[in-house]
Image (tube, rainbow, N blue to C red):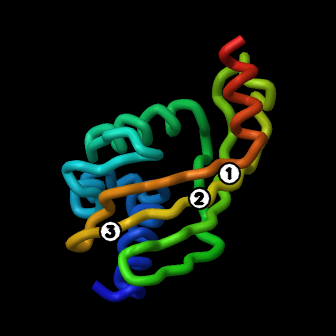
Amino acid sequence: MSAKKNKEVVRRFFDEVCNGGLDEKVYDIFADKVSFNGKQGSPEGVIRFLKRIRMSFALLRVEVKEQIAERDIVSTRRVWTGTPRKRSHPSFGKLITWNEISIVRLVDNKIVEDWKEESKRVRVIRIARKK
């Protein structure tokens, strides 16, 4: 598959699934055996994650800012926005943004490996919630 086609597959995830709510498309985009930051995952796990994040944030959107692809690897920089729903969240009721960069590998038109790094702000909020 060409680098251009691989970029299209990754972009479909953000456009159709994350923003469009078409969770059933996850099965077309992710392989049955997929790893996330080195840990085994599944399309069902992606859907569960999306449901949790949608429950946590109102007005959730993601905007792809840049994509770079070479052979079977695609890197995507994106910006998420959402309003925390939980009153205990430090930014409850306010629209917040956070950045992510990922590097994914595709085989047979599906994502098989995903490495993601998120902005420091997200990590700080997660640590604060655990305390």
Give coordinates of residue 46: x percent, y percent.
Answer: 36, 44
Q: Secondary structure at mark 2?
A: strand
How busy is the neighbourhood of tag 2: few (under 14 within 10 Å), some, or many (20 plus)? some
Give coordinates of residue 105: x percent, y percent.
Answer: 38, 66
Q: Which residue is mark 3?
A: 106
Picture residue at 31% right of the left edge, 41% below the top: 41
Give the number of marks: 3
Q: Nearer the viewer, mark 2 or mark 3?
A: 3
Identity, as a three-letter code, of the amino acid under mark 1: Thr
Seen in the image, is 100 located left or right of residue 54? Answer: right
For marks 2 and 3, give the CA distance: 21 Å
For marks 1 and 2, give the CA distance: 6 Å
Q: Residue furthest front?
A: 38
Picture residue at 32% right of the left edge, 38% below the top: 45
For marks 3 and 1, give the CA distance: 27 Å
Q: Secondary structure at mark 1?
A: strand
Label 1–label 2 contact, CB within 8 A: yes
Decide which of tag 2 and tag 3 comes sooner along the chain. Answer: 2
Decide which of tag 3 and tag 1 comes sooner along the chain. Answer: 1
Label 2–label 3 contact, CB within 8 A: no
Identity, as a three-letter code, of the amino acid under mark 3: Leu
| Vertical side of 44 occupied by 79: above or below | below
Give coordinates of residue 43: x percent, y percent.
Answer: 27, 46
Q: Quadrant of the C terminus?
A: top right
Compare residues 49 and 70 and report the one nearer the observer. Answer: 70
Identity, as a three-letter code, of the amino acid under mark 2: Val
Q: Which residue is mark 1?
A: 81
Give me the disc on residue 62: 2
